[in-house]
Image (spheres, rainbow, N blue to C red):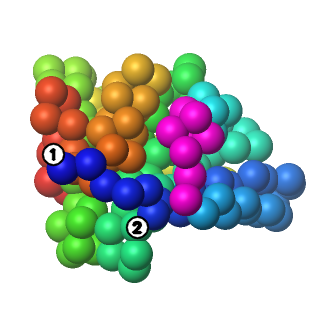
């Protein structure tokens, strides 16, 4: 079932230690696509696709180290996009303006993040062709 778009996109834009976030109500796919492609791990490190209070998708990271993609439909159970069989070493990535260590299996390439976001935008569901892990 396709949703009438009521997603709000929140984009973090860091200047030094200050976050000058931007909210875009009723985001279009083109706006979301552009925002994901602008994540650079420095100035732009995180975007959120928010529906209501408890349902959202978070995408953070950069094209060099990978993207972390998380979803929840109820703010109780959380899922992270993973690449099966990838080593479990940790990667240092800046998300939300802070550096953190993430398992390399959670660091997905841009096309995976875009596919997950497109499906979420259209259906508010996880993309079934991708692998999700409850975290």
Image location of residue 70, percent across then percent down: 33, 51
Lower position in the chain sequence, tag 2 or tag 1? 2
In the drawing, does residue 81 fall left or right of residue 30?
A: left
Q: In front: 30, or 14?
A: 30
At x 21%, y 45%, the residue is: 126
Q: In front: 115, or 25?
A: 25
Q: How many marks?
A: 2
Secondary structure under tag 1 reads strand
In the drawing, does residue 59 fall left or right of residue 55?
A: right
Q: Is residue 32 magenta?
A: yes
Image location of residue 48, percent across then percent down: 50, 56
Q: In front: 131, or 129?
A: 129
Q: Quadrant of residue 10?
A: bottom right
Instruction: Please give the residue where the numbered disc 1 appears in the rendered image.
Output: 133
Image location of residue 87, percent across then percent down: 23, 23
Q: Main secondary structure of the magenta part?
A: helix
Which range of residues does the magenta coloring cover?
26-33
Secondary structure under tag 2 reads strand
What residue occupies the far bottom of the structure in this picture? 53
Instruction: Please give the residue where the numbered disc 2 appears in the rendered image.
Output: 51
Image quadrant occupied by the C terminus: bottom left
Q: Is residue 83 above or below residue 8?
A: above
**Nearer to us: label 2 or label 1:** 2
Q: Is residue 94 visible?
A: no
Q: In front: 117, or 98?
A: 117
């Amino acid at each position: 079932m396709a949703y009438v778009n009521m997603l709000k996109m929140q984009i973090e834009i860091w200047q030094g230690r200050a976050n000058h976030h931007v909210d875009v109500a009723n985001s279009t796919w083109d706006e979301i696509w552009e925002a994901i492609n602008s994540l650079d791990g420095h100035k732009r490190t995180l975007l959120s696709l928010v529906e209501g209070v408890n349902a959202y998708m978070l995408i953070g990271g950069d094209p060099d180290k990978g993207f972390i993609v998380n979803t929840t439909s109820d703010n109780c159970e959380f899922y992270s996009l993973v690449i099966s069989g990838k080593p479990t070493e940790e990667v240092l990535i800046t998300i939300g303006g802070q550096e953190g260590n993430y398992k390399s299996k959670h660091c997905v390439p841009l096309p995976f993040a875009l596919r997950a976001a497109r499906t979420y935008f259209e259906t508010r569901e996880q993309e079934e062709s991708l692998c999700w892990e409850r975290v």
